[in-house]
Image (cartoon, helix red, strand yellow):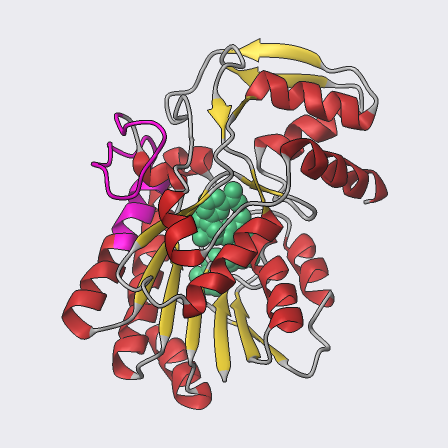
Amino acid sequence: MTILVTGAAGFIGSHLVQLLLSETSESIVGIDNFNDYYDPQLKRANVRLFENQPRVKLVEADFCQQETVDSLFETYRFDHVIHLGAYAGVRVSVETPHIYQQVNVGGTLVLLEAARKRPVRRFLIASSSTVYGTGAAIPFAEDAPLGIPASPYGATKRAAELLGLTYHQLHQVPVVCLRPFSVYGPRLRPDLALTIFTKAIYSGNEVRLFGDGSVRRDFTHVSDICRGLVAALNAPHAVGEAINLGHSQPIEMRQLIELLSQSLGRPAKINYQPARSEDLPITYANLEKAQRILGYHPEIPIDQGIQEYCDWFRQH
Ligand SMILES: NC(=O)c1ccc[n+]([C@@H]2O[C@H](COP(=O)([O-])OP(=O)(O)OC[C@H]3O[C@@H](n4cnc5c(N)ncnc54)[C@H](O)[C@@H]3O)[C@@H](O)[C@H]2O)c1
């Protein structure tokens, strides 16, 4: 069996390829264009962890190109698709929304079209907790009414979900939408607040905190997310569903800074900045559906995960 992983050089994608290598016997084709949304050298370093494995084939290409993607589907006859590739930054999407629309919506449509022509057993789409938007009831439950996404990023993730669910209904593409919540762990993206805070505390600089620190995020360890994705490949009742992958224990950003400070053994000097409207006040996953359909139970407590992350950060 062969599995296509888009965004394989990214933070979550590179962890997922490692998990697939250890937990499955599938051949893996990873596609990534190593774009410069953040330093492509970090992505090159991620793929060095597995690029020489005989079961892995890495393709440096853009999944927005229909011909390229069709020819990959033709060559490899994928059994499974895990679509992680995206522009993933909330803040940047406010400034440059078009690239988010092109890649997150247009690129998803290209992959769905390829899967319509060459059917697959399962097509996972990485959505996001940002689809819940402003006004959704807390904790976020998949089958309750959604709010309005607070950022173009969130809107493109919702659009990608809808395209996937339409392709399931119209063309029987076996789509499952997974909604990860604030993912963290070794090799974390450099544009995320958790990385920026860690760098600032470690180097004795001010931590720029937007708002008063009461914003709450449901930080979820990347290993839990990857196990949830792998479970969604085979779970019998997952197709056509949107499913949360979270931790269900949100913490305030000021608590996160405190945890980082303790784990790094250095004080944090906070420089408070005005709140930003693209930030939801809270993300909080209801995990009842993930538990029922995927048998998903997050395992890594936040203090353990942050300590592990800080240890990794110090070494790199
Ligand atoms: N990290 C989080 O907290 C989080 C939370 C919710 C959802 N997600 C979703 O999970 C997925 C992975 O996120 P991540 O944090 O690993 O991001 P990432 O930016 O590290 O990984 C995305 C990868 O996709 C690649 N890519 C982008 N456009 C491409 C294109 N046109 N062709 C080929 N490759 C392309 C990038 O080069 C990158 O390596 C994304 O879909 C993101 O929206 C992430």
Residue at x-position 18% and y-position 62%: 166
Q: Relative to the observer, which residue lies in front, 118 or 79? A: 79
Where is the C terminus found, in terms of image quarters? top right
Q: Is residue 171 left or right of residue 45?
A: left
Quadrant of res 177: bottom left
Per the image, is 137 magenta? yes
Expressed as whole percent of the image width and height from the top left, the position of residue 258 reads 69, 18
Q: Is residue 147 in the magenta section?
A: yes
Image-quadrant location for residue 197: top right
Toward which corner of the image does residue 208 lie, by quadrant?
top right
What secondary structure prevails in the magenta region? loop
Front one among 17 and 207: 17
**Where in the figure is residue 54, as x and y percent of width and height?**
69, 83
* Magenta-colored span: 135-161
Q: At which x and y percent is residue 229?
A: 48, 59
Observer able to see residue 36: no
Q: Residue at x 75, y 19 (%)?
A: 205
Residue 201 image offset from top left, x and y in percent: 75, 23
Residue beneath the point at 49% across and 56% down: 228
